[in-house]
Amino acid sequence: MHQEEHEVALLGAPQGSVLGAPQGSVLGAPQGSVLGAPQGSVLGAPQGSVLGAPQGSGPVMSTVVNIRSETVVPDHIVWSLFNTLFFNPCCLGFVAFAFSVKSRDRKMVGDVIGAQSYASTAKCLNISAVVLGLLVIIAVIITVIVITTGALVRIPY
């Protein structure tokens, strides 16, 4: 089948045209132009001109827009995830992770005060989890050393 067999005229327009416009033109503009601009020009600019800086020698005006940045609220989610996986005595790391997620949710909603509150709680829980985790590790190391040295003292040579 040829392509001509599949074309359908729109609203009685001749085949290949758009709504009665001359064939090859865009919505009634002269053939070869864009929306009525003279042929070879860019959207109505004088023929032969190049778009760019203004040709006059007047001062160039500029506008500066200051955009206020939102208050940055750290949610400590990475630290909480680390504590959940590695330093999790009494589930403090998991609870800190939950507060970090709550802080991130409050920040996404736009509640900066609530986000800061949850972030502060998560930070305190993370510090507690790290301190308790390190104390447990140090206690285990000391216990192992005491037990092994005590066992060596009891063994006669």
Image: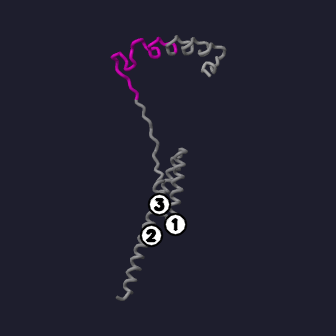
For the N terminus, the quadrant is: top right
The residue wearing badge 1 is: 90
Asked whether 126 or 147 is in front, the reply is: 147
Main SS, magenta region, reads loop
Q: At label 2, which amino acid type do we have? A: Val
Q: Are marks 3 and 2 in contact (CB under 8 Å)?
A: no
Residue furthest out toward the bottom: 156
Asked whether 94 or 85 is in front, the reply is: 85
The residue wearing badge 2 is: 136
Magenta segment: does it hold 53?
Answer: yes
x, y percent for residue 119: 49, 53
Q: At label 3, which amino acid type do we have? A: Asn
Residue drawn at (37%, 20%) of the image: 53
The residue wearing badge 3 is: 83
* Mark 3 or mark 2, earlier in chain: 3
Residue drawn at (40%, 30%) of the image: 64
The vertical placement of 154 against 140, above or below, is below
Residue drawn at (46%, 54%) of the image: 78
